[in-house]
Image: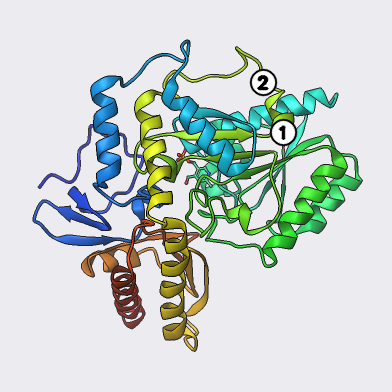
Amino acid sequence: MKLMNKNLMPTYSRLPISFEKGKGVWVFDKNKNKYLDGLSGIAVNTLGHNHRGLVKAISKQASKLIHVSNYYYIEEQSVLADKLVKLSKLSSVFFCNSGCEANEAAIKLARLHGHKLGIDSPNIIVMEGGFHGRTMGTLSASGGRKYQAGFEPLMSGYIRVPFDEIGAIEKIASKKNKVSAIFVEPIQGEGGVNIPFNFKQYLRKLRQICDQNKWLLIFDEVQCGIGRTGKWFAHQHSSVKPDVMTLAKGLGSGMPIGACIANKTATKLMQPGKHGSTFGGNPLACSAGIATLNAIEKENLIKNASNQGLLITNLLKDKYKKDKNVVSIRSLGLMIGIELSMPCSEIVNIALREKLLINVTADKVIRLLPPLIINQTEAKMLSDRLINTIESFLKNL
Ligand SMILES: Cc1ncc(COP(=O)(O)O)c(C=O)c1O
């Protein structure tokens, strides 16, 4: 089986495996080996693989109309926007194709807002350990030098502060720095599944500072949104509402689609011609978004994410509560991070031998992002396979 091709730009260090098909939480390689998908294509396959409702919706749409320009009114876009506005209690949606594009739209809103406040060169407060994408704008906003090195000059206009530390932001506010927004993941994904210590209070404080200074509060929910944490959007574990929220990954359950959602104030900053996308919000992508949201509702997947996430977390905590090699287990719903005391990137290969797909982020954090359709038996299997994987890894240290 060919697992390399020099005609592909070497942007990824890929694992030596290729998949042919999937069903539910399972994916199959060409030799019919069956793997439990604990990663969902990095929080993408909300409904797992080959979901009947999704496949039916996109097949039907593909046979009617795949793409038309945003020069025209697109019915499916409108239906999906109505749903997202209702769920988020915000006011308008811009559709694009990915997380970084959704964030670019949010960054542009922050800049427009700054200019409206009379700031010539507005800054956005961003977080250490944050990740917002790979375009130059979002790369510059992201916290890791790992992603930025070699791509200088980076885009200016960001002030970086430690995540989950209100004091640093208060200091900036007190110095009358020319700021127009705070841009933050409520739960950091790539940064290591970092959940603010006092989640509700942290978000409440961010909201308060933004209100006091007329800054926009922008939540990047590209990874933690769409039911994954046991609420439609992670910030809904608090009473705080952002001015702008970005989504992508799980929204289309595998079809590329992103969304930047704004409240009334932020919506007013946009006018025709200020932003756009050729593909963004085309009928096919939106039909996947509609089918995904409908299935989440119909199959009660948000509650399921809470239940199965808790089950997996408790099984892992039970096993590792006295093991010094496991520093902490952090989770909200089906966004789960297991931090080891040592770098553990090779554990991904050990997991493959256990027929389990996982990922390691921030060097030491095993990340689980299984599909929201995972059932109790599968959640137990995932925990068992992961425990076997961690045990093999620790034994071979
Ligand atoms: C929180 C967050 N924002 C933005 C992105 C970028 O999304 P995309 O790869 O779709 O551009 C990611 C991707 O991992 C992410 O986790």
Q: Can see residue 221?
A: yes
In the rendered structure, the answer to whether residue 350 lies left or right of residue 324 reads left
Measuring from the top left, give residue 202's x and y in whole percent.
73, 59
Say which amino acid is labelled 1.
Gly
Note whether 128 is above or below 315 in the view shown: above
Q: State which mark lies toward you, 1 or 2.
A: 2
Total numbered labels placed on residues in the image: 2
Dividing the image into 4 quarters, which one contains the C terminus?
Answer: bottom left
Q: Is label 1 in a helix, a strand or a loop?
A: loop
Residue 270 marker = 2
Q: Residue at x 30, y 77 (%)?
A: 384
Q: Determine crowd level at label 1: few under 14, some 14-19, many 20+ residues with C-alpha closer than 10 A.
A: some
**How much space separates mark 1 and mark 2, taking CA atoms?**
20 Å
Say which amino acid is labelled 2.
Met
Image quarter of residue 264: top right
Residue 247 marker = none
Measuring from the top left, give residue 84's x and y in whole percent.
53, 38
Figure coloring: rainbow
For this orientation, the residue located farthest to the front is 298
Q: Residue at x 29, y 35 (%)?
A: 57
In the rendered structure, the answer to whether residue 242 lies left or right of residue 29 reads right
Q: Residue at x 67, y 67 (%)?
A: 197
Q: Residue at x 41, y 80 (%)?
A: 315
- Between 25 and 74, which is closer to the camera in this rendering? 74
Q: Earlier in the sequence, mark 1 or mark 2?
A: 1
Q: Determine crowd level at label 2: few under 14, some 14-19, many 20+ residues with C-alpha closer than 10 A.
A: some
For this orientation, the residue located farthest to the bottom is 322
In the rendered structure, the answer to whether residue 393 lies left or right of residue 172 reads left
Residue 157 marker = 1
Measuring from the top left, give residue 318's x and y in whole percent.
45, 85
Q: Can see residue 139?
A: no
